[in-house]
Amino acid sequence: DTEVTQTPKHLVMGMTNKKSLKCEQHMGHRAMYWYKQKAKKPPELMFVYSYEKLSINESVPSRFSPECPNSSLLNLHLHALQPEDSALYLCASSHQMAVSSGNTIYFGEGSWLTVV
Amino acid sequence: QQQVKQSPQSLIVQKGGISIINCAYENTAFDYFPWYQQFPGKGPALLIAIRPDVSEKKEGRFTISFNKSAKQFSLHIMDSQPGDSATYFCAASPPMSFNKFYFGSGTKLNVKP
């Protein structure tokens, strides 16, 4: 079982709603990630946090707002989403320095988001 | 521009057979090549990974073959089992990149009993 826990597993929200996705890991990892995955497609990187600081923002629209309250938690705040934002949102973490390649990334099971 | 190209898109193999999935990349700076396995409704899980200083890595029934000069790498699943039925993604990552992976498009493997 994955050690990256995501809640909720399923979320349906209207285009005017504000909601949040939550992610937690207790592996002592200092890098955390948000990915978006559409059906039959590979994951797409959205954000990378390294030591609780935002290191990569892949030009994600501002209606997605990440937050890293501490080294174990990662949130993704959602506001004014569009139906095309419906997807599986994956949180992931990796050990220590994310800057070097080769650190195993551990994915959570994801949050299925439907925007109506 | 797709940095990592993966084929085939789908693959059907009989139980006990060998499954082979291929990936090709362009960026010679890539220095880490993982394969991820994803079951329906689950997040991807690291299966096996290789660095370009070795030509082959084996873990149980799973083997990565790496050809640096051809900029290609492949996943071989020996004695394929129905439980191996999943989507497989190859990926590549350059150094100093905050683990930014370039994923292949995925291969859906179906192992028939």
Image (cartoon, helix red, strand yellow):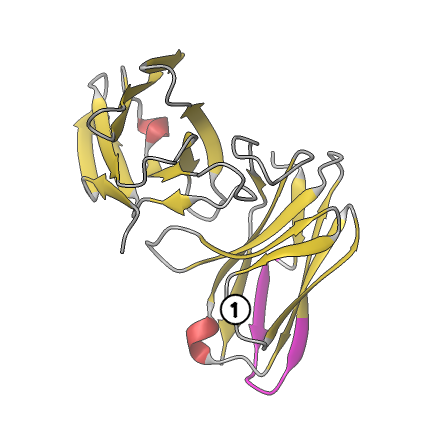
The quarter of the displayed image where residue B13 is located? top left
Query: In the image, what residue occupies the spot 54% across and 79% down?
Result: A81
Q: Nearer the viewer, residue A15 or B50?
A: B50
Q: Residue A95, position in %: x, y?
A: 66, 33
| Circle 1 crowding by C-alpha within 10 Å: few under 14, some 14–19, many from 20 | few
- The residue range painted magenta reads A9-19
Query: In the image, what residue occupies the spot 37% across and 12% down?
Result: B58
Q: Residue A89, position in %: x, y?
A: 53, 58
Residue that sits furthest to the bottom in the current view: A16
Question: Chain for mark 1?
Answer: A
In this view of the protein, can residue B61 be seen by the observer?
A: no
Q: Residue B111, position in %: x, y?
A: 25, 30
Left or right: B96 as drawn, with respect to B81: right
Query: In the image, what residue occupies the spot 65% across and 42% down?
Result: A4
Q: Is mark 1 on a helix, strand or loop?
A: loop
Q: Quadrant of the C terminus of chain B?
A: top left
From what the image shows, is residue A8 above or below residue A106? Answer: below
Left or right: A7 as drawn, with respect to B50: right
Q: Which of B85 and B90 is in front in this view?
A: B90
From what the image shows, is residue A50 above or below residue B33? Answer: below
Q: In which quarter of the image is the N terminus of chain B?
A: bottom left
* Residue receiving disc 1: A60
From what the image shows, is residue A80 above or below residue B78? Answer: below
Q: State yes or no: residue B4 in magenta.
A: no
The amino acid at mark 1 is: Val
From what the image shows, is residue B84 above or below residue B24? Answer: above
Q: Nearer the viewer, residue A64 or A48?
A: A48
